[in-house]
Structure formats: C-alpha cells, structure tokens
Amino acid sequence: MLSVYLIFNLIILMKVLVATDKAFAPHAISQIRILIEAAGYEYLLLENYRDVSELVTAVFDADALIVRSDMVTAEVLDAAKKLRIVVRAGAGYDNLDLASCTAHNVVAMNTPGQNSNAVAELAFELMLYQVRGGFSGQSGTELRGKTIGLHGFGNVGKYVADIAKGFGMDIYAYDPLVSERVMKNHGVKQCNHSEELYLKCQFISIHLPSNDITKKSIGYELMRRMPKNAVIVNTARKEVIDETGLLKIFEKRTDFSYLSDVEPDCKAVFEKKYKGRFIFTAKKMGAQTEEANINAGVAAARQIVDYFKTGSEKFRVNK
Ligand code: NAD
C-alpha cells in the first residue's frame, strides 16, 4: 500500500530551497540539485544574499529548506507558509530557532559528522601556523611530543585525536558523555573534569556545542591552569569562551595564544595589544572545503528526500 507520504509526494511538486548567504562549493551545489531533481522535486537556489528580507521572500512557497549558518528565525518561519522541514547542512544548529520550528510544525535537522574532518584539519592548520611563528623566518616549535587536550570528544574531537596521533602528540580528552573505552580506542587518555584537562595540556582544542551550559564556560579559571606556552584553538563557537577571562589571561601571561575560527567580540583589543599571539579567521572557515560542502549538502538533500518519501526523522533536533 502506498504510504501517505508517497501519495502526497505524487500529487504535489515539492519545492526545495537552498538558501545560503555563504555559498556552497559549486560541486556541492550541482550534486544537491541532481539529488533533489532525481527525487522529482523542484530545486530553488538563493545564494550570497545580503539581507534577511531576500530569504523571507524566497522561502514563501518552499516545502523544504537547506541552510548553512543562516539564521532561521521566527520571522523566516512566519513567512514560510508551506515549510515542513529545514535542514542545517552542518553540525551546530544554534542558528535554527528550534522552539519556533516546533510551533510552526517544521521538522528541524542537522547533518552531524559530515564536515568533521575539515574542521579537525583547520585546527591543525591554525596550530602549525602559530607554532612556526606565522612563517616569519624565525625559529618555531614542533607539535611532536606536546600535550593536546580535547574539550568535547564528539565527531570533530575524534578526528582531531586521530590526526594528533600522527603528529606524535600526547592526547587527553574531557567529555562526560563519552566512555574511557571509546577514548582509548582513539589513543586518548580520559580526564575526569575540565580542570584536569587544562592543567595537563599545553594545547587545548575546543569541540563543545554552544548551549546554556557551555556558553562562557571557558574562562580565566580554566586558562590560568594551562602549562607554559599555552595555546587554545577554538573551532567550535566563540560563545563558549568567556572573553573577559580571555583578556585577563592575555594581560597576565605573555606566553598565551588564542586561535579561533571566527573573530571574537574583543578582536579590536587583541589587534591593538597582542599582535602575534592570535589568529582569527574573518569568516567561519571550518567547513569551507569542497569535500565538507559536498558531504553536508548532499546529506541534507538526502534527509529531505527520505523525510518526504518515508517520513524518516533521523537527525531531527527539535521536539
Ligand atoms: P558533537 O555533537 O559530535 O560533539 C560534541 C561533544 O561535546 C559531545 O560528545 C558532547 O558529549 C560533548 N559535550 C557537550 N557538553 C559538554 C561539556 N559541558 N563538557 C565536555 N563535553 C561536552 O559535535 P561536533 O560535530 O564534534 O562539533 C563540535 C563543535 O564544533 C560544535 O560547536 C559545532 O558547532 C562546531 N563546528 C564548527 C564548524 C566550523 O565550521 N568551525 C563546523 C562543524 C562543527
């Protein structure tokens, strides 16, 4: 017997809007399009838009929406009269207003794990550039034999551990939801609390989600414990850092570096006072590889097709 979803799908031509203010790589776009059209849906694209009003207009008759870091707010959802599903092509979904999605009967999903390797590689790109003094010609240091602590041991943290092993680093992690056995399988030693992690590790790589518990959770009290020539690399979210504490540690310790995928709010102070001790990407770069774009974009399109054809709500993040 035909499922309700299939009948609905046969009668109505679904519209899937890909809306990204920071465009996917061209190869990713063409693969997403092929997948959507092969399923019999109409493909719509809004790329590099400058104002939310463009998204509000474009989403009007879309049944499904794929976004990247674009804000899906109550305003966008109010305008989307037919919307049934929104998929964030990426891991973090703090750009989706989940309560509003639920109130509008919209299923919200992410695509976990699809861009993790790209983010992990960026963490090393930042660390290597920093320890070699920005390739300035001065003598730098190596990663081999140094301690690295992974704050959060989910999809990205695991890739970072695997790469760190190749560099010959001594790897620790703190994640209350991951067992010692899983960490051991990746060659990682478990810490029982975050203080222990920061105390042990010269390099800390942050891989936490941004939520009510983690926001501003990494501040002076943790940072001050770190060994000499401490480096924090943050490819997660700027919100997890307590920037007042960050500025305090920079004031007190000249051996401290902070590397971050996106600029912190206190960037101007860094530029004025702490040249050479920070790297901030101007735009979020973690998932900006062709491979990650294809993985996450195609996964998002597949999840939409599966949802319409079978009702599958795997990777749903709202209740
Ligand atoms: P994930 O959900 O797979 O892993 C997060 C891990 O953090 C989980 O294992 C969880 O148990 C752990 N955790 C949660 N709260 C914790 C706490 N208080 N203390 C210790 N551990 C805690 O997520 P992921 O895919 O590994 O992503 C990690 C971070 O990287 C997220 O913030 C995500 O948004 C970000 N990210 C950034 C980019 C980028 O472009 N820079 C791309 C992908 C992901």
Image (cartoon, rainbow, N blue to C red):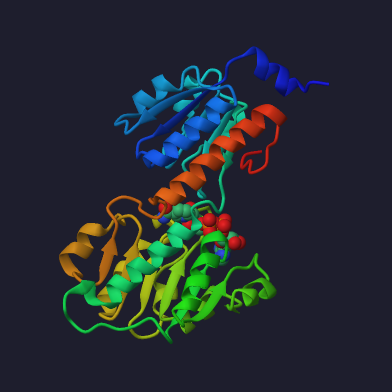
Does residue 15 sit above or below 123 in this rendering?
A: above
* Residue at screen point 48% across, 29% down: 74
Quarter of image, res 14: top right
Using the image, determine if residue 113 lies above or below residue 270. above
Seen from this angle, which residue lies furthest top? 11
Closer-to-camera residue (46/236)? 46
Q: Is residue 216 visible?
A: no
Task: Tell me which residue sits at (52%, 65%) in the image.
Answer: 159
Residue 303 drawn at (x, y percent): 61, 37
**Is 140 drawn above or below residue 85 in the view shown?**
below
State the residue at coordinates (16%, 78%): 137
Q: Is the N terminus in the top left, top right, bottom left or bottom right quadrant?
A: top right
Counting labels gives 0
Measured from the top left, where is residue 45 in percent x and y? 41, 27
Q: Nearer the viewer, residue 184 or 302?
A: 302
Image coords of residue 140 (percent x, y): 25, 82
Question: Measured along the vertical axis of the image, is residue 131 above or below residue 154?
Answer: below
Left or right for 269, reference 24: left
Residue 146: x percent and y percent? 42, 84
**Rendered image quadrant of residue 174:** bottom right
Residue 9 quadrant: top right
Residue nearer the viewer, 14 or 277: 14
| Residue 208 visible from this viewpoint | yes
> Image quadrant for the C terminus?
top right
